[in-house]
Image (cartoon, grey):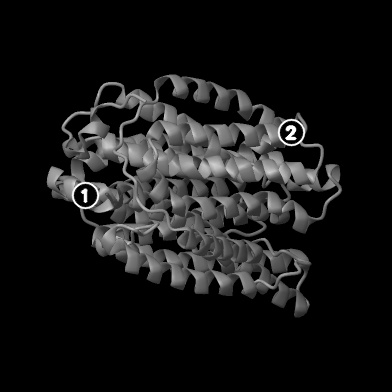
Amino acid sequence: MQTDAVQSQPEKADKTEMPPGGALLIGILVVAAFVMILNETIMSVALPRLMIDLSITATTAQWLTTGFLLTMAVVIPTTGYLFQRFTLRQVFIASMSLFTTGTVLAASAPGFELLLAGRVVQASGTALMLPLLMNTVLNLVPARDRGKMMGVISIVIAVAPAIGPTLSGVILSALEWRWMFWLVLPIALIAFAIGVRLVKNVTPTSRPSFDGVSVVLSALAFGGLVYGLSSIGHSAEGSTVPVWIPLAVGVVALTVFVLRQIARQDDGRALLNLRPFATPTFSIGLGMLMISMMALFGALILLPMYLQNILGLDTLKTGLMLLPGGLTMGLLAPFVGRAFDKIGPRPLVIPGSIIVSAALWLMTLLDAESALPMVVAIHVLLSIGLATIMTPLMTSSLGSLPTHLYSHGSAIFNTLQQLAGAAGTALFVTVMSTTAASRVASGTSDAAASQAGIHTAFLWGGAVSLLAVAAAFFIRRPTVSANTPAEADRGLAQVN
């Protein structure tokens, strides 16, 4: 298979200009990733309809969301190895093939079992695409222009999950649930066809050793943690497995996994190289991004509950109320990226983290008498803050790594992002449910108890957000020296 100069001459990693066709390649990957990530949250509004159509319980239906997240958490940690072993073109074709096949399975599913299988296959493709997009940007885009490109990626990470419920609400208001997949299929097929024609190999490859034991440990670790947290967050009544069991398995497996990677990374045999954590800018930025994802997914789960259970809106109106925030993030992301390229991360991250915290504290004021414009305004404020910090955090964190750690840094970043989303959902919903249950037990009405639970959950969210505000003052602009040709040569020699 023909490869370009980037693969045959990796010593040119410190680029001053993007290679011809690079912008088009990234554009294809962005469209594909957006469509895929959209499916992460598109099912949330559809679950009540599915319970009726497929004659399944709430606990069973929830697996359509939990199974997607679980598959993502299991597959993403392996991408550090996959991106070294296989070319960009091979990974792209595998990702799109899996996602397209999964979409067809889900759209044509006669029952729950095939629908769940389709979701799992979809998630397998999605888990490859987002790290692939990040890795491609880091390898193709000069350091001075990465903020602009990472701004586009932040649209995929934040906006796609945010508008998923809105899109599903609109579709379900006029069509049956299968159209959520049939309408996505043509877009996926077009992106697939264009990509097969235009995607070339622009990243170096090697033959790192494959560690099957680490793959199993990774699946148990991240799968156990995400499943346990999702079970808490979705209050899986009637589950035959107590929540503490998958959480305990996840913690133990993660400990063994980390120790094994540390022991094997010196000679290049680690499945996931953990050296990115030794870079302070990467670690601090990743920590802040995890807090931001907790806030985003926590708000995505609580605000619909508030709008439907407290204010009495239906699913379509609920989705439309959340749409302005998602659109705001999408519109701001490219401008924030350009600003990062000019002024660096701190002038953006510090005010952005303060805005996120302020929005979460303002959400504690919401009650049964709150006007809808106020709810929309607070959600838009939260979206502005998240848009202001996500691009600088991604760009400064991943850009601070040496070239040979890009694939591992992307894998770590995306794995912990999924974990943070599950943790945010678990934190917000557990606090809400616990508070509401205690109020009901003391004689409070269901509506008042639910309102108190949501209020307390946002209090916790506001408190956690203060950690991000403090960490924002330690963010630094990545140094260009991290991507020198000498660094790239040493890294490639290490994995070979």
What residue sits right under mark 1 in the picture?
Answer: 493
Q: Residues within 10 Å of mark 2 (few under 14, many from 20)?
A: some
Query: Residue 336 appears at what percent x and percent y?
Result: 32, 40
Q: Is residue 402 above or below residue 201?
A: below
Query: Residue 453 appears at what percent x and percent y?
Result: 64, 68
| Frontmost residue, 493 versus 38 | 493
Label 1 secondary element: helix
Q: Are marks 2 and 1 in contact (CB under 8 Å)?
A: no
Q: Is residue 25 above or below residue 133?
A: above
Q: Residues within 10 Å of mark 1 (few under 14, many from 20)?
A: few
Which residue: 77% across, 46% down? 113
Q: Left or right: where does residue 362 sit relative to residue 171?
A: left
Q: Label 1 is placed on what type of residue? A: Ala
- Which of marks 1 and 2 precedes in the sequence? 2
Disc marking residue 422: none
Which residue: 72% across, 55% down? 309
Q: Is residue 112 above or below residue 433?
A: above
What residue sits right under mark 2 in the picture?
Answer: 178
| Frontmost residue, 41 versus 251 | 251
Of badges 2 and 1, nearer the viewer stands 1
Label 2 secondary element: loop
Which residue: 66% across, 73% down? 434
Q: Is residue 329 visible?
A: no
